[in-house]
């Protein structure tokens, strides 16, 4: 059975609540969706609007906080991993 998860954008001073949410089988699937949402924010340039104090908070239907992903830390880490993968491909091709 699918569960509903919400992705709120939060900082110390402000909360931008997700009023729609997504349906996912479990937290792992919700995390995959959250990661995809953060990648979309990077690609659209929307992530540039959020400084280091912002996080994506995953909560369940009851409102319980399940995971908190610091936006800039997550995006920096994934960019580093993508760059490392490209470097590895370059090194193995030459």
Image (cartoon, helix red, strand yellow):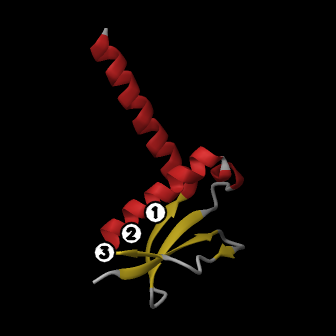
Residue pictured at 30% horizontal, 75% vertical: 25
Of residues 52 and 6, the one drawn nearer to the viewer in this rendering: 6
Q: Is residue 73 visible?
A: no
Tell me, yes or no, whether the two marked residues, 1 and 2, touch with CB atoms within 8 Å: yes
Tell me, yes or no, whether the two marked residues, 1 and 3, touch with CB atoms within 8 Å: no
Circle 2 — which element? helix
Image check: 13 left or right of 55? right
**Residue 94: where, in percent of width, then height?**
31, 8
Q: Return the mark for residue 34.
A: 1
Vertical relation: 9 (above or below) 71: below
Q: Are marks 2 and 3 in contact (CB under 8 Å)?
A: yes
The tag on residue 26 is: 3
In the image, which disc is placed on residue 30? 2
User: Residue 49 lies in what quarter of the image?
Assistant: bottom right
In the image: residue 92, left or right of residue 67: left
Q: Position of residue 54 (x, y in %)?
A: 62, 62
Give the quarter of the figure containing the N terminus.
Answer: bottom left
Q: Is residue 38 left or right of residue 1?
A: right
Q: Nearer the viewer, residue 90 or 72?
A: 90
């Amino acid at each position: 059975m699918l569960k509903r998860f919400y992705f709120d954008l939060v900082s110390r001073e402000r909360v931008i609540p997700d009023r729609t949410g997504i349906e996912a089988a479990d937290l792992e699937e919700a995390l995959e969706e959250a990661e995809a949402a953060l990648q979309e924010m990077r690609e659209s340039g929307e992530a540039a609007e959020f400084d280091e104090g912002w996080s994506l908070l995953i909560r369940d239907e009851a409102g319980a906080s399940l995971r908190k992903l610091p936006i800039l830390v997550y995006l920096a880490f994934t960019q580093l991993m993508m760059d490392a993968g490209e470097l590895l491909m370059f090194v193995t091709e030459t």
